[in-house]
Image (tube, helix red, strand yellow):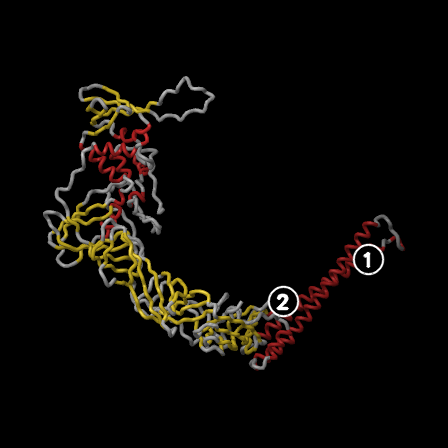
Amino acid sequence: MSRRAWLALPAALIAVGCHASPAPAPRTASTLLPLRTVRFYETGVGYFERSGSVDPRQGTSVPVPAAHIDDALKTLVVTGPGGIVHGLEFSSSVSSGMARALGGLPLGGEGPIQYKDVLAGLKGSSVEVRTDRESVAGRLVDVIEKTPAADEGDDKKAKPAETPPPALELLVLTDRAEVRTFRSSQVVSVRPTDPVVAARWSIALDTLSARSAQTQRLLRVMAASSHVTLGYVAETPVWRTTYRMVMADDGKTGVLQGWALLHNDTDESWSQVRVHLVNGRPESFLYPLAAPRYTQRELQTPEDQLSTVPQLYDKSPDAIWGDNVEARDAWGSSAGISAGYGTGGGGGYLGSSHRSSAPKVRMGATSVTTTESHLLSIGNLAPIPQATGVESGALFTYTLPELVDLRAHGSALVPFTSQTVQARRLTWVDRGSPQTAILFTNTTKQTLPAGPLAGYSGGGFTGEATLERTKPGERRLLRLGDDLDLELSQSIRRSEPDYRRATFDGDRFLQTHYVDVSTHTLELENRGGQERVVCIPVRTGRNARLTGADELDFEPGSERPVAMFRVPARTRLSRQMVVEVAAMSSETADSLASSQLEKVVASSRLEDSDRKVLVEAIAKVKEVEAGVEARSKAEREEAEVQGDLERFREHLKAASGDKGGPGGVNPFAQRIIAAEDKLSELRKRKQALEAELTQRRQVVRATLRKLGK
């Protein structure tokens, strides 16, 4: 076999196909049912509606890509009055495995189809073998591979040449009962003469072709009425949105323009089609229906996939799921054959966190845990409302005002909304530099899909942001870029906590409720030609009072209050803002410090009943502190005696055998005995101090339980 014939595998397939008998052609030409409406969804599917006259004699068809037939059969619906449809007729789809079986090819193969595989698939079939000199009809008995013999004259030390491909020989039983062989290099073509074999190869090639999933199939409409309307769902590119916000001169409103990006990825050009854009996510899944099914085992649907390449671009649902050939082992056949499965495939923040609104106060050995107080109520922030959106329906639909003409495999950017909305121009000061921002409220009656947004003001571009999915009434903060004309510096001065209440949980924690006051001095400079509304988020909870700002609001999507200051054009000014936060600190009763409790008692606004209890508790806490000091002193003495004892034992060991001293008693031994007696006495004293300290702490808890009574 020549190298050209070995490598030109696609050409070999075409040669076999060209000499095969064609598949039966339709009896009559079919007209297409016109496309009238397309409805795009965010889940990557579209609803296609076709409406028109049906000619029973000529036939009317619905064009659908081969890979979308399953979707069309699964969702096809007859709409409109008077439409009577008896059914749809279409060419059956086959899976890849079935196509290989029809062509006599090895099952489970995913690689290129070889010339020898095509010939092997014709074994036993009636064929016509044509060479340069003759044409012989008969049956193909076998296809034999022969490896070319090595050249005996080659120099063994030389670099070996490329191994030539195996040669093929065709063994044919002719119609005259002759057994003949034909070398593949002599063969011009091999044509199956059995029309059944040719038809099977035609069906197989429809599936095994690289573009088989994109081939347009026709669903012939069988109807009893002259006019029908059919709708079905098929995979489509996800429609996406982009926005433009054109701000008004007053800086309080703007025109929101919404543009939709559409794609016609079909082979059919759209002419005067009504397009609806649905802002919703109805569930949709793949389900194989078109191909004949042979019961082997239960099939389960795959998980939804989202990819830059459509699932059904070059594969059908059967190709994605595989042929499940390995399951046939349980049926006693096709052992060892497997099928491949497709895979879906500086300045800005005021205060501190609302969880830590006040400075940490050390009352004892551990730091105080601070949270928002539930007893004190001083806030002027709580009444400020936050806008919430209410979605009045599951789906919102935008209908394009004009009919759409869009060529096959074309894309279009079309406007779907243009409305005046509430949009306030701001300068937002957060962790970094001041930023130009828009506080946008969706005053339309429909949900806006997510998408990028370009801002325009004063005839120029101001920046870009991303608009999240926004329901009617919801607010979004859109940050567009740095505001270089605004500068801000601040200094913060904190006052001592203003204690108001004290509570005890009855077992462990003393809770002191106080007001933390911080004064913020702001230096603002606006070098621009327009007034700036400077917004500074304050990191505190709602149980707080904020004074000194021109306006108060909340940051959309969070609990952070926002102080707003108006700064005229080309102006430098100084402003002062006071933030009062109702906070609560918690400390374990065993770690209370009398000095900190004295600060709480010294507060002029502490309730008298709480002060009376805390004054009593201070005396008890001082007794605890005295006990802690006594225990510490005993521990130090114990450590000192323990050190002396170890030293004496070392001396005794070094002086072993030397009795010394009166009566022959070693003086180190006497010291050891005295140290051990003292150590024992200290340990007993320490135990007594521990018990006394525990009792004193219990007295502190008993005293604190009087709080609130």
Mark 1: which amino acid?
Arg
Residue 570 sits above or below residue 317 on the image: below
Mark 2 packing: few (<14 Cα in 10 Å), some, or many (20+)? few
> On the image, numbered disc 2 is attached to which residue?
365
Residue 393 sits above or below residue 375 on the image: above
Front-most of 6 and 86? 6
Question: Quarter holding the N terminus?
Answer: top left
Res 552 seen here: yes
* Residue at mark 2 to residue at mark 1: CA–CA distance: 39 Å
- Residue lying at 58% horizontally and 76% vertically, measured from the top left: 495
| Residue 274, horizontal then vertical, whole percent | 22, 59
Front-most of 120 and 673? 120
Q: Residue furthest top?
A: 153
Question: Quarter holding the C terminus?
Answer: bottom right
Helix, strand or loop at disc 2? loop
Residue 671, label in figure: 1
In the image, which is nearer the foreground, mark 2 or mark 1?
Answer: 2
Mark 2: which amino acid?
Ala
Helix, strand or loop at disc 1? helix
Q: Residue furthest right?
A: 662
Q: Is residue 685 left or right of residue 310?
A: right
Mark 1 packing: few (<14 Cα in 10 Å), some, or many (20+)? some
| Residue 643, horizontal then vertical, whole percent | 76, 57
- Label 2 or label 1, whichever comes before in sequence order: 2
